[in-house]
Each structure stands twice: as structure tokens, then as C-alpha cells.
Image (cartoon, rainbow, N blue to C red):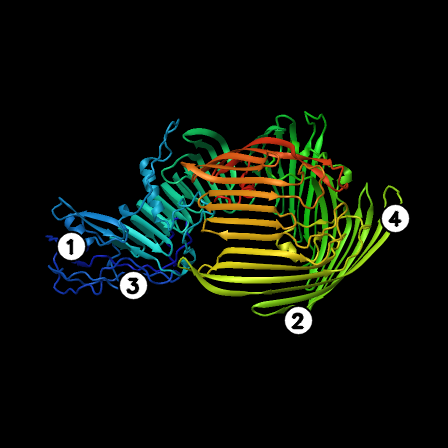
Amino acid sequence: MRRRLFLLFLPSIYTPVSVANEALWNCVQSKDTKEWVCVGEKKPANKTSTAKIPDQVEPVKDVQPEAITTTQPIVAEPVNVESESVPVESAELEPSAPKRSESIETDKDTRQVSAESKPVNLLPVTPDSKKLLQTESNRPGWSCDANTEGKNWDCKLVGTDPKAQARPVETYEQGISLLTPAFDHNEEQTFNNLKSQLKYDPWLNCTAPGGGKPGFVPEKDLRNVSPLDINSDYAEIFDNEIYSYVGNVEMTRADQRSVSNKASYDTISETLDLQGSVYYSEDELALHSESASLNLASDQARLREALFISPSTPLRGRAKTIYKESRSLTRYKGVAYTSCRPGNQDWVVHAAELKLNKTTGQGAAKNAWLEFKGTPVFYSPYLSFPIDDRRLSGFLAPSFGNTQRGGFRLETPYYWNIAPNFDATLRPRYLANRGAILGGGFRYLTEMTAGTTDLEFMPNDSLRDNSRYFAALKNNTQFTPHINSNFDLNYVSDKEYFSDLGNALSTSTYNSYLVSQANLGYANEGVSLRGHVDNYQSIDKAITNERLPYRRLPQVNLNLNHSFDFMPLNTLMDAEYVYFQHDSVINGQRANVKPSVSFPLQTASAFLTPKLSLQHTQYALNNPKGGVLATDSLSRTLPIFSADSGLYTEKDVNFFNRSYLHTLEPRLFYLYIPNADQNDIPIFDTALTDFSFNSMFLENRFSGTDRVQDANQLTAALTTRLVDATSGKEKLKLSVGQIIYFQDRKVTLPGYPIETNQLSPLVAELNAGLTDHVSVSSGVQWDSHLNDIVRYNAGLHYVNEPGEIVNLGYRYRKNTVIPDLSGKRLYDIIQSDASFHWPVYDNWSVVGRWTYSLLNNSTQESFFGLEKENCCWRFRVIGRRWINSINLNQNPNTPDALPIVDATGISQTGVFFQIELKGLTGIGEKLDQFFENQIYGYRKPQE
């Protein structure tokens, strides 16, 4: 028969248990009563008038003191102790000192401890006998016993002194409270003891981004190959069926460890009883109970007055009784739990009854109520909730906020788990100024397809007196490993839907268009083919239909590339066909083909890549209004030659007693494209690319193919880096470059003048990590023709943990491209930007951002908030002001494609809250994603 020792909610433990006491016994048998009288090695037997010692007695052989220890793997068979008579002789008056024996590992080596299936009778515990019988316990800490006179204590320390360990000074202050603390002082001390038995403090980094388990290596997987070690002060075996352990009973296997005053195991009924201050710990659990009774055959257990810590969440709590009815079903009576660290009881959940079913993944509580800061705030006669990753239908945490246009907003979503691959969320929303909105989303998942559908409908807007709606459909399908499709379709009833009814936190910047698009693609080695269609809907009342982008119905792109193993030769072809459709302006079809061949030559310190391309573009035009075009067919064919080259040199240097790797990387890029008259070609999707260090190495300064620049130019650049030789981190990078033009640039966008400068602005970009927490970034462009700085930006970033973030930025941009005859610097930008997240006092932090236009003396966007966070709850409130829409007015001195930007726009304000009880629930807006988008260096805290 296998014997299992089940240690409190753990997998079954199969092991042979060898039995030996920690004190050497000498035993004699009473002639009259036939009972055995045993004493330790250092104390003679008590004299008795009824017991006479036979002359022919032999000592009990090889029975030596030993902690109850197993060294066999857990899967070995148990031992069988058989009864047989053992002759004994009288105990020696001065026995030799006890010696520790080797662990007993096999059935044959097990010593007989009973002659007539009767239990071994322990001697009465007296100061003398206790000193003789009790041995050292493996329980860490101090252990004390009375000395022989019974007046003083003899104490010894095992392991480190627990009082010498560093502990944070933490006292729970109840303050103004309607309730007594859920956990009294003694229970809080027990929680601290339980926490000390874990391999890491689960609340150590509870407010730091990422949190984590510092240096934690789980040992759960070692249980099946690790022995079970049992140590106790006393032990007895009755009839080879009942094993009893008394005094400092400690059981250890891999990550599992239990300590109790008494333990009893019945091999017939397979029951284990632990009594007296039971402590148990493993990788992901620590608990204390006054008693524990476990039926190992049926995986049942009963614990009374239990305290527990689950470090993975982390959670801690108390239960009057715990009934484990099976491996998957557990019931609790009189439960109270919290995620607050020991010593803090800011929030506690109470329940009269609690049931956890691992088979269904659901939990249920009866008469549950929540207290916060000693005040009851919520009650429910019945609650149902998931206990794992499986989904469960029910109400989700509500969210609320306030905006200038919508007023107070409250949303109470309900989740419906339809099937394992289908679910839906109903999102009814109420806005005080406008009325109710019924919204919902549906998600689906198959072997090839995943998608979502979202719908919102407002029957009547109180301020507009009409109905409003929004619909969205997203889908992604993988037909084969090489063929996929996706579409994102959106439609809204009116242009101001999102500015009136949105929560203003979903996006950090204002969008002028609502885009719908669909794609079908094929990709394999050396070839890719993609079809694309899109449509634009204006959601800015200042944008007329004439200013909407062209629809592409469709756009088809084909890319082919091939390289040869026997020679440095790469071939590439880009081909495109697109039909541009618009309701108000010229429509057209465009076909573009660009084959190219390059010869990459490279060594460890240099590279040279000459490249030759031929680009042909064909247009077919028509006027949707029936007007007469000068021509309905246009074409353009241009050769393109480029040569990219560079060197890489490095050397070791030392600065301030630190070793660095210093590199110098000069680069030359030559580009030649002959001039071709392109003024008759309309502009469908082309604009100037933003000029920067990287853009100087492009073959075309225009995005799109409606314009191909004329070029005879050379780009000269130098990059230098400083890399920490120890860590490999790049501490500094400086790049400087300029384009030398050998001819004027006659190809321009409509309304733009010919460029005649012989030199481009001198570009310099710097990125440096001054320390592990401070970094700077800067860029400057100097125009020698204007003898002025045309662009400048600088940023200082300080990021430290936990939550210490400061960002300062400045941006200057002078318009040198778009004609502006008004003299009002309408296209210039002079802007400052500051953002921060900083702890101030007692877990309170301030957070905010301010973007200000120095040119217009106006705030572009700002928000400020307060945040309070500790290990068990988080509170946030922010107020935000942002530009809700931008005024666009026609510049009479520029072509139709060039608007005037009025930076004043239309602003809106809003206030948003978030309250989260960690490990339980939260209400209000989820602000972490908003902070990550707005504050450089911000990371979402640990859940």
C-alpha cells in the first residue's frame, strides 16, 4: 500500500518514511504487565517493584537516535514494520553519548519498535526527561527550555536571529473608523511570520513599474524528485499503522515546509492530522492554522482558524474554517481578505461563505461586503466571479468622468461569455447633458479569423434633438501561411460625434478623418503582392468635402527581389497600380514601375553600394464634373543613379577611469536624376518629406510618386558614437550632415518656388545618456543662405524608479518652404513641452503635461492630476484641457492645397477619476494607457 503525506493543498506526496527517535532508547519489558518501559540514553529507568529484569536479555541492536528523515525519492514504496519479540537488558546507569544514525531507506532496514502490537509509551515529561529526550529542532529561531533547577531558561539559536532582520517600521493606524480592525495585533504578527517564510516579499516592489519577484527561482517542479524529510522531538508507531510525532514536528520537501506541535498519520485511512500552531509554506502559499485534518485518499481537508498569504496576487486573509472537499472544490466559512501588506487594512472583503471551484473556474460568495478605511461601502447577498483566466459573464467595473460638452458620464458595462470563441460586451452610457447611449461590442475567433464589431446608438441627443450613431467592424483572416486579409471599416453619423460623446482619453491628438480600409496580401520569399482600398470620412466640421483625401479604389502593389549567391548583385522591382477617386476634383489612374539593380560591396570597415533604377509612370485622367482637361494621358520615364558609401573605424578610449569604444563613421551618398517637366501631373498622394538627417539619404524628397525630384547632389555626413565597454550601452551619438547641390531643383509642388540654394541646411543631431537616469536629445538645422537657425529642438529626460519622471522640451521650426505672404508666421512653430510624474509625500504623486505655443501665447494641451498609490489601492484624478478641433482657413496667396492653420482652435475641458482596489476591482477611467502616450518614460505599475 502506498502511503501519501499530503501537506495542505499540495500534490500528493509518495514516500517511504524511516522512523528513528532523536534520543537513544533503552527499553525493558515488565514481567507482569508485559509492557515496555523505555528511557533515553542519558537517564536510567525508573525503578519499579513489579518489574524484574530477566537474566537472559540482549540489547536492542542498532537503534540509534535520528531525526525522522527520508532520503529516498518520493515515488518509492512505503515501509512495513512487522512485530516480533526483541530481548532487552537493563539500561546502563551511564550510557554513552547519543550518536546520529544514517537514514533508514529500505523495508528490511526498518527497526522493530513493538513486540505485541502495543504503542511505545513515552516517559512523563519532566525537566530532566525533557532535557534528555528533546533534541535540536530544525525550526529557525530561538528555542528555550527550563534548566534542571527549573528557575532559569536554557536557550539556543538555530539559523539567523529573526529580531536582527531588517523590518520596515509600519503601524496600522485605524483613524476614524466605524468598524474594529478585521485582523487583530496577534494576527498581524502571524502574517509577518508567514511573510518571512516566503522566498521573497510579495509587497516589496508593489508600487514600482513591473513589480516582480527579485531573485525568485521556483522549486515546485522538484517535488517529485525530492525526498521528504521529517524531524520531531518524539515519535511512536502503533501496530505498524499509526505514526505519531510530537514536539517541533517539521516536514520538508523541495519548496514545501510545514511546522506543527503534533502530527499523526494513519496508514489505513490515509489521514494526516496536524495540531498546534501549524505553519506551512511553499513557493506560492503560506498559511497558519491551529489544526489541520487531511484525508489523503479523497483529497479532503479541514482547517480551523487559518491565516493565509498568496504572494502571486498578493493577497492575505483569514478563514474560521476551510473545507477542501476534493482536489478542485474548496469551501470557506467566515472569510476576510485583502491585498494590503501586513500592518495595513485599508480595504477588506468579508464573506460569510465562499466557494472556489477549480473545475468550473468560478467562485461564489454569500453575504459579501467590502470595507474601505474602516467604513462599509458595498454589500451583496451573492457574488459570482472567475478565479482563473476563463471568462465569466457578469458586470464589469464601471467608469465615469466629466467633460465640458457631455457633462457627467457614467458607463456600466456587462460582459456576456457566449462561447469559448464568441463573447460580447454591452456598454450602456449616460451623459448628463445629452442623454443615454446604448453601445456594445462583439468578438469572434476561429482557426483562421479574428474580429470585432462595435455599435453605438443614441436615440435622441438632448442638445441636437436628433439621433446619432457609430459603427465599426474589424477583421483579420489568415487563409494560408502566405495569404492574409484584413479590413477596418468605420462610419459615424456626423462630424462632431466623437468630440461631443467621446471620453477624450482614447487618443492623445485630434484626428481630422475617420478612415476605412481593407487589404488582401500574399507574401513569400522574394515576392509580395498587396491589394488595398480605403475611404475617408471627415470628422472635423472645418474640413469640406473638397479637402478630403482621394479614395484608392483599388491600390495594388507588387514587390520582387532576388540576390545571387555567386556574386554581389541584388535585383528589385516595385510596381504599383492605383485608381484615385474623388467626388469634387480630377480623378485618375496611375501605374508605376521601378526596376533596379545594385552591387553591394562590403568589408569589415567599409561599404560601397552603387544602384541603378529606371522609373516609368503612366496616368489616365478624367474630370468627374465633365470639364475639359488639357490632356487625359500623361507619362514620365526617368533613370535614377545612386552610390552609397561609408567607413567604420573604432578605438578604445578612457574617460574618468571608464573604458569606452569610440567610433567614427563617415558616409557619402551621391544621387543623380535628370530633370523632367512634371507640372501637368496632378497631385494625388504626394507631399514633401520632413527634412532630417535620415532623409538626406533618400532617393526622392517627395512622398508618393506624383513627383520625382531632379537631383545632382552629394550628401556628406559623419556619425560618432561612444559605447560603454562594460555594459555595451550607447552613451553618446552625434551625427552631422549636409547636402551639396550641383544644380537647381526645378521639380516642385504646385505653388512652390524653384530651389536654388547650393547647400542644404547643416543638420546636427545629438543623443546622450549623461547618467543611468538622465538623457538629453537635441537637433539643429542651420541655413547658410538665410544665415539663421531654421529648426531646433532640445529635450531633457530624467527617469528614475519608482515613478520619478521629468521631461522638458523645446521645439522651434521656421517655415522656409510654404509661401506665406501674410507676414504672420502662420506656419512657424515655437513650442515648449513639459511633462512629469513625481512622488511628493506619503505615496502621493503629482502628474501632468503642459504644451504651450510661444508664438501664439496659448496652451495647446495640458492636464494635471494627483495620484495616491500603495500596495493595496490606487486613486487618481486628472483635469485635462485639449484642442478639440482646428480651424482651417484658405490662404489667398497659396494654392488650394495649402490651408492656413489657426492654432486657437476649439478647446474642451474634462475631469477623470480612477479608483482601483488591487486584487479586487476598479472603477473610473483606466488612465495608464493615457499616461504612457503623454509622458515619456512612464510605465504602467504592477497590477
Q: Which mark is residue 568?
A: 2
Q: Amino acid at mark 2?
A: Pro
Marks 4/1: CA–CA distance: 133 Å
- Image height of 455 relative to 672, above or below: above
Decide which of tag 2 and tag 3 comes sooner along the chain: 3
Q: Amino acid at mark 1?
A: Asp
Disc number lying in front (1 or 2):
2
Q: Which mark is residue 32?
A: 1
User: Mark 2 near mark 3, Cβ–Cβ under 8 Å?
Assistant: no
Please state the total of marks drawn on the protein image.
4
Marks 1/2: CA–CA distance: 105 Å
Q: Amino acid at mark 4?
A: Ala
**Residue at image location 69% in from the left, 46% down from the top:** 817
Name the residue tied to disc 4.
630
Of 366 and 781, which appears nearest the observer? 781
- Residue 910: image quadrant is top right
Name the residue tied to disc 3.
104
